[in-house]
Image (cartoon, grey):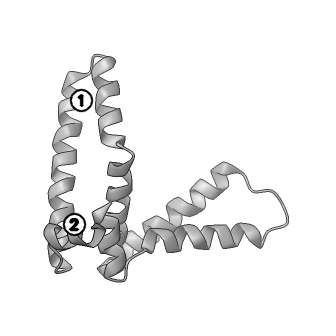
């Protein structure tokens, strides 16, 4: 949670902005929108921000990583892989998650915020 607070404190909330934009688009429509159409739009918008690079892309990347960590997506996926007998896949996922954690720390350092400073924001 501290990373989300950190991202917000440096002008983040990119994830919130994209989701809000999606909700606003829904409010402007009189017809029903399907879940698949909404997912496609969100995927396109996220891709657009990430491919543009720069600060917004870094913040969105960090915010998505925080969200996935918050809901324990990695742990759930690893547990499922182990349960299905795919230990090698579980090890690969753990390696990828470890790499993502390092990347997020690096991105925060590039934003000139340390984990200690960020943790203090939650106190």
Disc 1 to disc 2: CB gap under 8 Å: no
Q: Is residue 36 visible?
A: yes
- Rendering coords of residue 49 (x, y %): 42, 73
Q: Which quarter of the image is occupied by the C terminus?
A: bottom left
Q: Is residue 23 above or below residue 92?
A: below
Q: Is residue 74 above or below residue 10?
A: above
Left or right of 114 in this view: 79: right
- Rendering coords of residue 21 (x, y %): 60, 73
- Rendering coords of residue 98 (x, y %): 16, 47
Which mark is first along the chain, 2 or 1? 1
Give the number of the disc on residue 89. 1
For label 2, the SS is helix
At 49% from the left and 70% from the top, the residue drawn is: 16
At 30% from the left and 27% from the top, the residue drawn is: 79
Give the residue at mark 2.
119
Left or right of 21 in this view: 49: left
Q: Quick one: 105 or 89, which is closer to the camera? A: 105
Alpha carbons under labels 1 and 2: distance apart: 32 Å
Q: Is residue 58 visible?
A: no
At 35% from the left and 34% from the top, the residue drawn is: 76
Q: Is residue 37 above or below residue 11?
A: above
Q: Is residue 80 above or below residue 39?
A: above
Give the number of the disc on residue 99. none
């Amino acid at each position: 949670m501290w990373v989300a607070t950190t991202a917000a404190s440096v002008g983040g909330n990119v994830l919130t902005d994209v989701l809000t934009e999606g909700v606003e688009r829904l409010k402007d429509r009189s017809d029903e929108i399907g879940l698949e159409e909404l997912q496609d739009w969100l995927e396109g918008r996220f891709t657009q921000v990430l491919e543009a690079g720069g600060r917004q892309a870094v913040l969105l990347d960090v915010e998505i990583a925080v969200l996935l960590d918050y809901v324990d997506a990695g742990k759930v996926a690893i547990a499922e892989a182990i349960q299905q007998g795919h230990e090698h896949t579980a090890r690969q996922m753990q390696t990828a998650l470890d790499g993502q954690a390092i990347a997020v720390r690096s991105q925060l350092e590039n934003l000139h915020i340390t984990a200690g400073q960020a943790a203090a924001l939650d106190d």
